[in-house]
Amino acid sequence: MENEKIVVSQKKSTLVICIISLAFACVVMIFMIFNVEVGDGGAKTARLLSTPFGVAAAKVFFAVCAVACVYSAVIFIKRLANPKPLIVVDESGFTDNSNSSSVGFVPWRDVKRIYMITMKHGKLIQVELAYPEEYLNRMGGLARKAAELNMKLGYQPISFSLNGTGKNPDKFLADMISIWERNK
């Protein structure tokens, strides 16, 4: 099949639900920042909050959580506003835009193996590369460190999930392998 192409995009409804959930979580965190007070030392958890240090630590924790919620919401809003495909597979290779550590386009000649692993809450498609260092160098510092740690644990630097896309991972994997085998 010439010009065969698989395009995987994020479902807009999933993005909207994530944004609403993160906004709610952020409001709760902000509420907690302004409502944590020194307690009377009753229960074990209240004892921690019975000191000014405990209250300050709790406020810092909730502030960090609020910032993380806002940051995540901004990422989802950007994805909603600019709905570029997460994964595109064609006869020349595949383009991975699925997460912050994505490496972009990978030609089939650089792929050694494609397979799936099942984790506790889903399936991950793993792409084993002939020269992973070349692709690790495309990643930012934190993403590169995470990918290197994954490799030490036996996982691949390119890994993606189809959660939230509505695509069947088993069918996608079979189709991707089929295109790869015809074009490698």
Image: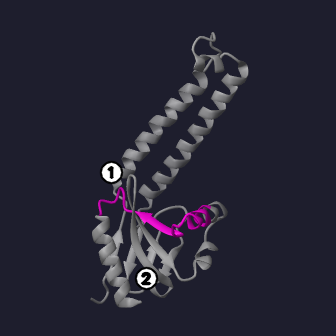
Amino acid under disc 2: Gly
Please tell me which of labels 1 and 2 falls first in the chain.
Answer: 1
Confirm or deny contact between disc 1 and disc 2 (CB under 8 A).
no
Q: Is residue 65 left or right of residue 108?
A: right
Segment colored magenta: 146-167
Asked whether residue 27 appears in the rendered view, the answer is: yes
Q: Is residue 98 left or right of residue 61?
A: left
Residue at the location (57% across, 38% down)? 65
In the displayed structure, would residue 12 be above or below residue 176?
A: above
Numbered circle sitting on residue 93: 2
Residue 123, how many percent across, how many down?
A: 37, 61
Asked whether residue 49 appears in the rendered view, the answer is: no
* Relative depth, front residue between 80 and 149: 149
Amino acid under disc 1: Ser
Q: Is residue 132 left or right of residue 18?
A: right
Q: Label 1: state its secondary structure.
A: helix
